[in-house]
Structure formats: C-alpha cells, structure tokens
Image (tube, grey):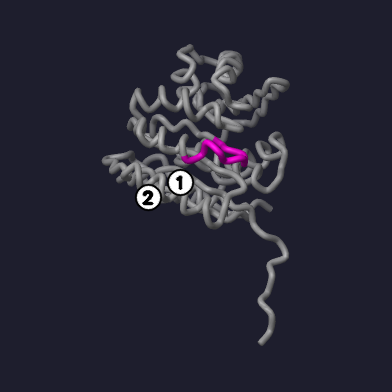
Amino acid sequence: MSPARIPARIPARILVIAGSDSSGGAGIQADIKTITCLGGYAMTAVTAITVQNSLGVSAIHPVPVEIVSGQIRACLDDIGADAVKIGMLGSWQIVEAVADALADVRVPIVLDPVMVAKGGAALIDADAAEMMILRLLPLASVATPNTPELAELTQTDVEDAADALLAAQELLNAGPRAVLAKGGHLAGDTVTDWLVTRGLQRAFTIERLASRHTHGTGCTLASALACGLGQGLDLEAAVIRARAFVAQGIATAPGFGGGHGPLGFAPLP
C-alpha cells in the first residue's frame, strides 16, 4: 500500500461566524466561496438563517445561542484556526457567546460589524450593537465597517472620506488594533477605503465600478482579509489582495437576480 499523500501546502484554516444567505450572494455562502478561491480552508459557525435574495431579506431565524457556541468550540477544539471572521450576529446574547468563545483565541480576528442588509433590513438590534462595542471590538485585529456602520458605532456624521478617517480613528479607541473604513456608500466617482492603526493612516482609492451587482461585498472583503491574515500576509498586503478580489467579483458578476445581484467568485489571476 502506497503511503498517504501529504499536501505540499497546508491551507490556512479560517473560521467564519456569521449568518446564512439563502441566495448564496452574502453571508456564510459568500465567505466559503471567497476563502476557497483564495486557497484557504473554510469552517463555519452559523448564527442565523435568513430568507433572502437579491431583492432583500424577508425573514430571519436565529440559531440558538448554545448551538452557535457549540459550533465554534467544535471547530477550534479539533481542527483549529489560523484566523477568524465575524459577520452577522443579530442579538446581544449571540454577541456575548461569541466573545466568550473567542476570549482566549490568539489568531487574527476580522470583525465585520454587520448591521443592515444591502436591501435595508436590520440585521442587529441596539443591545447587540452596544455589546459588540464592549465585547468584540477589543478582540478584533481589524474591524471593517462601512460608513453607515461607522457612523452608528461612533455616533458621528460620516459624509465624506475626511469624516470617515476621523471616525475610524475614533473607533480605534474602542479597542480594535486596526480599522478598515469602507467608503463604498459615499457619493463620488471614486471609492476610498481608509486603513487606520495607531501608527498608520493609508487611503486605498479605486474608480467606482458602476454595477448593481454588489450583494455581499462586505462579507467577501472581510473573509478575504481574514484569509490573507491567516495565510501570513501582513495587514496592508492582506487589504490590497482583499480589495482586488472584491473588485474582480464586481467586474465579473454573473448578472443574477433583479436587485442587488451577487458577485462573481473565482481565484485571482
């Protein structure tokens, strides 16, 4: 009998804690596709089942807190993780359970503070947002808010890229080691994302891609970033690759759905 074949390259193990999207464009489904395309190994702890498509979210069914915690422990206790991505959580009880489960985890944690779906549906309540600030932001290696989320988390107005930079600097005071403030919701022909740490302020700017197929861009970016960090990329390199993956996804979107359609998912060239 021939010996077992040992893979030449062991993939980075990425644990995703987030909600499920029945249409496959965002949430856990987008996370798995992204991590797989970038050469990682995706594991999941599902926090909620959503009924949604490109037109919006019509129902949300939370997963029991003990099942969320159990999924996290099952992954960490056996396979382990090289990075963690956190997305939709929904309730303060789940936020607290996730924070408890990750309290002793010593790998990069990417927190995407999901609050509102692309179609406008609320994905988190006020108590959960407050608990996220208190319990999860201090654990995060990097938080990836869009501008509405950034405004909500800092209770400030974010009207342009300069406001986004100031708000990102303020959010650092809540404890994350870095903030990637995404500028896609701001008006203009260019999109500027700010990467801010205590020793760095870097703007990443790209021409806006005119497309309605942007469902799941935030989930995809955060998962790509977590994958890069889990694979050993430094923060700036991981951000550059994650942004390139999202831009490619928008440019190659398959055109599905009558609303905010899903991205195209394929390995980067």
- Callout 1 amino acid: Pro
Name the residue: 49% across, 16% down.
Answer: 154
Report if residue 106 lies within the magenta region. yes
Q: Residue at x 32, y 45 (%)?
A: 63
Disc 2 crowd rating (10 Å Cα; few below 14, some 14-19, many 20+) is some
Residue placed most toward the observer, 46 or 51: 46
The one nearer the camera, 182 or 79, is 79
- Label disc, if present, on residue 262 of the rendered structure: 1
- Residue 26's place in the image compared with 203, above or below, is below
**Label 1 neighbour load within 10 Å: few <14, some 14-19, many 20+:** many
Seen in the picture, residue 157 relative to 214 is either above or below; the reply is: above
* Lateral position of residue 248 relative to residue 92, left or right: right
Q: Secondary structure under badge 1?
A: loop
Q: Residue tagged by mark 2?
A: 23
- 174 or 77: nearer the viewer: 77
Query: Depth check: 226 or 218 in front?
Result: 226
Region of the chain picked out in magenta, as a range: 101-110
> Which mark's residue is nearer the viewer, 1 or 2?
2
